[in-house]
Image (cartoon, rainbow, N blue to C red):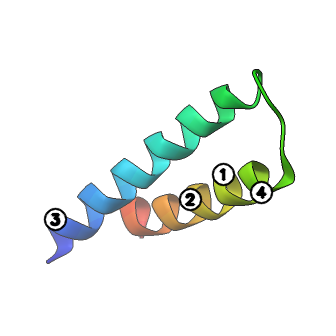
Amino acid sequence: MCGMKKICGFAMFWIAVGMAIMLFLEATWIAIMIIFALLICGYNLFCG
């Protein structure tokens, strides 16, 4: 089960990176909130 948490965390982290790149094209508050949520969840799952 620990491996699956790391994979999910890794995926969430890179989704958040992709969304951060999206901000250069169109900035919305919802996208910013999703980015922070995914970064926090991804970090906790991958490193925790």
Q: Residues within 10 Å of mark 4 (few under 14, many from 20)?
A: few
Mark 1 lies on residue: 35
- Image spot of residue 27 (x, y percent): 84, 36
Question: Marks 3 and 1: which is nearer the front?
Answer: 1
**Camera-side residue: 40 or 47?**
40
For marks 4 and 1, give the one nearer the viewer: 4
Q: What is the secondary structure assignment of the residue under circle 3?
A: helix
User: In screen coordinates, is 29 left or right of 39?
Assistant: right
State the residue position of label 2. 38
Helix, strand or loop under label 2: helix
| Amino acid type at mark 1 | Ile
Which residue of the protein is positioned furthest toward the top in this rendering?
25
In contact (CB < 8 Å): disc 3 and disc 4: no
Instruction: Give the mark toward the camera: 3 or 4.
Output: 4
The answer to which of marks 3 and 1 sits earlier in the sequence is: 3
The residues tagged by marks 4 and 1 sit, at their Cα atoms, a distance apart of: 9 Å
Residue bearing mark 4: 30
